[in-house]
Image (cartoon, helix red, strand yellow):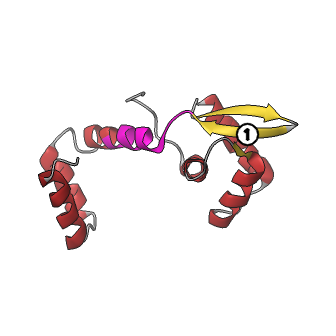
Amino acid sequence: MNNTMRRLPDTELEVMQVIWDCTPPISRADIEEKIYKRHPMAETTLQTLLSRLTEKAFLTVQIQKRKKYYTPLVSRQEYQVSQSKSFFQKVCGGNLSAFANALCEGGLTREELAELRTLLEEGNL
């Protein structure tokens, strides 16, 4: 896993979210159908985003019977871990108190904070 993975632009991340939600490999047509429900976009735009994600090594593409099928090379969890570490270092300067304060002031509900506390106490994080 690459711990210094760059943050994806929002539209590329939306495409990856759709792909992560599916069992790979997923056809371009299936991606288009699913992404359209979240964020309608032109077929050419989607193709450009898939090409960029392939160039960035987030996806691999296979062609079978003139159809393109995509498989993620980076898991959702790998991306989340990388981005969490990046946020912690860049935005909070590696300061745990600043990070916790950002979470609390960022709108976490009491229930979410209680769930976070439980996860920490049980060693599940």
Drawn side of residue 99 relative to residue 40, left or right: left
98 or 73, nearer to the observer: 73
**What residue occupies the far right of the structure in this picture?**
66
Q: Amino acid at mark 1?
A: Tyr
Q: Residue at x 59, y 46 (%)?
A: 12
Residue 54 screen position, x and y as percent? 65, 33
Drawn side of residue 119 relative to residue 15, left or right: left
2 or 52, nearer to the observer: 2
Drawn side of residue 102 relative to residue 53, left or right: left
Q: Residue at x 79, y 52 (%)?
A: 43
Question: Label 1: how many residues lie within 10 Å, few (<14), some (14-19) or many (20+)?
Answer: some
User: Which of the 4 image quarters holds residue 102?
Assistant: bottom left
Q: Give the quadrant of the N terminus.
A: top left
Mark 1 — residue?
Answer: 69
17 or 12, nearer to the observer: 17
Residue 59 screen position, x and y as percent? 61, 35
Question: Does residue 124 belong to the magenta stretch?
Answer: no
Q: Please identify the dominant SS of the magenta region.
A: helix
Position of residue 47 relative to residue 116, above or below, is above
Q: Residue at x 74, y 32 (%)?
A: 62
Q: Residue at x 68, y 39 (%)?
A: 70
**What residue occupies the far bottom of the structure in this picture?**
110
Query: Please, what secondary structure does the residue beneath circle 1 have?
Result: strand
Residue 61 screen position, x and y as percent? 70, 33
Residue 21 screen position, x and y as percent? 56, 53
Q: Which residues are magenta?
A: 73-84
113 or 91, nearer to the observer: 113
How many numbered badges does the structure rendering display? 1
